[in-house]
Image (cartoon, rainbow, N blue to C red):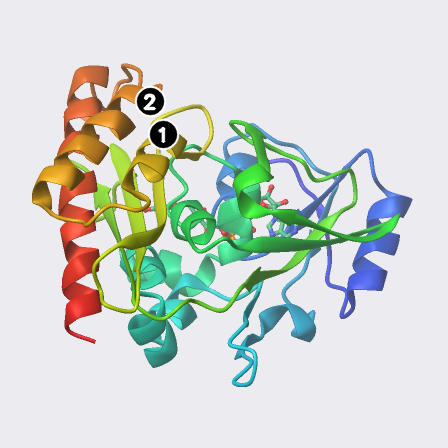
Amino acid sequence: MKAFKYLSPETIEAAIFFYGEHSETAKYMAGGTDIIVKVKEGWMEPEFLISLKKIREMGHLIKNKASGELSIGALVTHAILEKSLMIQNDYPILYDAVSNIGSLQVRNMGTIGGNLINAVPSADGAIPLIALDGVAQLVGPEGERSCPIKDLFLAPYETVLKPGEILKKIIIPPQAPHTGSAYIKFGRRAAMELPLVGIGVLLTLDSHDKICTKARICLGVAAPTPMRAYDAEDFLIGKTINKKILIQAGNMAADQSKVRDSIRGKAWHRKEMIRVHVRRMGLKCLELINNR
Ligand SMILES: Cc1cc2nc3c(=O)[nH]c(=O)nc-3n(C[C@H](O)[C@H](O)[C@H](O)COP(=O)(O)OP(=O)(O)OC[C@H]3O[C@@H](n4cnc5c(N)ncnc54)[C@H](O)[C@@H]3O)c2cc1C
């Protein structure tokens, strides 16, 4: 492994300043579970690693009780999200995703921000945050801006972040009543494996728990970047949700996906699993709404 200098600023401004000083050769680091592997394997040879870990304002997990808005600092680890009763109760889709990432050790170190910015098609954290209409707050040399998580990814390992930009936090807007959400990481093994496909569904029903007023069907490893199955979502709006309707939505989502063969699985298998699990996750959403 090539030696690097380790910088550990305590503010976002200082981190951006350090990056500016060494931009050609510097990389940001959060939990290090992705980037340290790349450095050790020699796929990446930064001269400076700028740790963001001491920036306290990026480590907060706060729900505004008055507005219902949730703010997740980019440095919040998967383990913190997994253990939070508020996440377990109010954002089951996020709990389902983060509680199945890697091992306990990986979840203790890995952050939700690092999971997004690493930008692999299999990032488990991306799917629930897209389904929840999350918005990324970015800070860089040119100031602050925001970007919906659904528009954050350009290609595998590539996001819209400009050089020096930092993902500061993710904002989740208030959830409507009568909403249920669920995610499944489908793989051949139960633990320590990236998903063959990841399927997240969020449904909001009207005040009589009958008609669908909002639908999100989000897929991981189904295209070069995490995707929404827009046709299937639109199909559900205005309908009474039942198993038959969800089977049709699952078929539409599978047809919309751009799955491919890889060493971990075949395209046809991925498609079948999307078909099956859109239905199952949809039914789980109904169950959560009915049991609330
Ligand atoms: C054994 C093992 C198992 C794993 N299993 C899974 C799994 O099941 N599911 C899954 O999705 N992932 C898995 N991962 C991948 C990884 O653990 C996660 O993606 C993790 O969330 C990455 O977060 P991190 O804080 O460690 O990122 P880091 O490694 O610190 O950073 C990742 C990238 O993001 C950039 N970055 C980090 N934070 C910021 C920020 N705030 N602003 C700007 N840039 C930033 C870094 O420069 C780097 O390019 C696994 C990894 C290992 C080693």
Nearest the eye: 98 or 67? 67
Q: Taking the image as drawn, is residue 277 in sight?
A: no
Q: Nearer the viewer, mark 1 or mark 2?
A: 1
| Disc 1 + disc 2, Cβ < 8 Å | yes
Quadrant occupied by the C terminus: bottom left
Image spot of residue 90 (x, y percent): 35, 72
Quadrant for the N terminus, please: top right
Circle 1 is placed at which residue position? 231
Q: Is residue 253 visible?
A: yes
Residue found 27% across the figure and 14% down from its top: 261
Q: Which residue is mark 2?
A: 256
Observer-nearest of 38 and 190: 190
Pick the front one: 95 or 42 = 95
**Among the two numbered marks 1 and 2 on one chain, the one whose residue lies closer to the N terminus:** 1
Give the residue type that dot 1 points to: Asp
Relative to 281, is 170 above or below? below
Give the farthest residue toward the bottom: 66
Graded by Cα atoms within 10 Å as few (under 14), some (14 to 19) or many (20 or more), the crowding at tag 1 reads some
Residue 280: give x, y in percent of width and height: 13, 46
Quadrant for residue 42, please give it.
Answer: top right
Amino acid carrying label 2: it is Gln
Residue 23, percent from left and from top: 83, 39
Q: Secondary structure at mark 1?
A: helix
For the point 78% across and 38% down, which residue is it? 163
Q: Secondary structure at mark 2?
A: helix
Q: Judge whether 203 appears above or below 222 on screen.
A: below
